[in-house]
Amino acid sequence: MKILLVLDQYDGANNGNTMTARRLAENLRARGHEVRVAATGEDSDWKWGFKDYHLPIFDHLVTAQGFVFAVPDKDKMLEAVRWADIVHVLMPFPLEKLAIRTALRENVPCTGAFHVQPENIWFSVNLGNCMPLISFTYWFAKKYIFKYFHYVHCPSHMIEKQLLKHGYKADLRVISNGISNRFEYHKSPTRRKEFEGRFVITMSGRLSHEKRQDVLIEAVRKSRHADRIQLFLAGQGPVRDEYLKLGSTLPNPIMISFLSTDELIQLFGETDLYVHASDAEIEAISCMEAFASGLVPIIANSPRSATPQFALDERSLFKAGDSSDLAAKIDWWIEHDDERRRMEHLYAEEAKEYAIDKCVDRMLDMFADEIRRCGKPLPPERELYGRDRSAD
């Protein structure tokens, strides 16, 4: 099958949407599918490259988030869409709107994904808690992009409920973006010098206001064991300098760095406890990768985050935005080392339900349904899934 992925940014590995797209492409190719991309960057034999668009006034905010918009090009998009058996759109911006219009005109099957939560946009300008603005953004996205789809990929039941609440009429397919097989239970036999004798707490992900790393920093400050804790934030983003300053006065100054996948796997092997403090989250692959690696998570119990679904019990939840409650949960896990080690294995086992192979199967099911709806021929079962599913 020829699958075209459309998203503004595919190059680099500095944001969750890009990583999701690259993981999907890698696993589809491993099954024998031909995957090409329409995104910013240079042309190649697997990509139609589009020029960068620099947003007036707000460009520094966009680039600080590790993102770039694309300039739509009708001729180039027409070539890309005509190549494809199916087009899968991963973002809700002008490049993707052009891809949808072109696919409809050319009668090429097209599906969409809801990966960009309105809160992620508006927290960047401190408006993430303006609920009328958030509701308007859901409505605008529906009118601008999502009304054209018969099938929409939702990474979590939380976002599915939000779309239903805001009147989305598509067939909403809840499919996790999946955890790479590289993340599995492991403990490093040795630790780097900076971690020796310390209890290491990690949070991974973009450094931005809605992720609430500030709550975690304050919780470490309030912990009874603050003098033992080494806090590591793995990521980059617009509030990096703010958090470096905030965490510089901890008993053990905060460590912040953007890590490659190999480096993140190593860090998880040296970590004792994982915290996910975000107020708004569609799924949180970073948290999933952590507990797949054998880390007990403590997760903000926010109604606008899908991440609480991963907590196995109340000990892994804290009141969103409440640093004192988070400090109490951190202290409990530090003081119950045997229970933490037992739960590490349970979390790693739970992660297998979100293995990337299962998720890709479900994505292929959605693609097949859209192709059938458009009256197009499907490849044989073995060719579609890369294996014989008759025994499943």
Image (spheres, grey):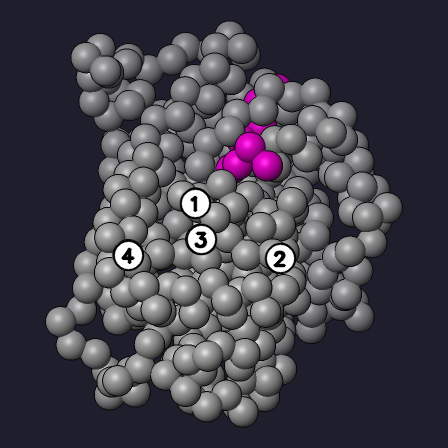
Which of pointers 4 and 1 lies earlier in the amino acid sequence?
1
- Mark 2: secondary structure: loop
Circle 2 Cα neighbour tier, 10 Å, few/some/many (<14 / 14–19 / ≥20)? some
Res 337 quadrant in image: bottom left
Circle 3 Cα neighbour tier, 10 Å, few/some/many (<14 / 14–19 / ≥20)? some
The quadrant the N terminus occupies is top left
What is the three-letter code of the residue carrying label 4? Glu
Which of pointers 3 and 2 lies earlier in the amino acid sequence?
3
User: Is 128 a magenta residue?
Assistant: no
Mark 1 and mark 3: span between their CA atoms?
A: 6 Å
| Residue that carries the numbered disc 2 in the rendered image | 320
Res 136 quadrant in image: top right
| Residue that carries the numbered disc 1 in the rendered image | 313
Please provide the residue range marked out in magenta. 150-158
What residue lies at 65% left-to-right and 31% top-to-bottom? 161
Could one spot residue 379 in this view of the protein?
A: yes
Of badges 1 and 2, nearer the viewer stands 1
The quadrant the C terminus occupies is top left
Residue 252, how many percent across, how many down?
Answer: 42, 89
Instruction: Point out which mark residue 315 bears.
Output: 3
Relative to 344, 210 lies left or right: right
Relative to 36, 325 lies left or right: right
Mark 3 and mark 4: span between their CA atoms?
A: 11 Å
What residue lies at 40% left-to-right and 25% top-to-bottom? 362
| Residue that carries the numbered disc 4 in the rendered image | 339
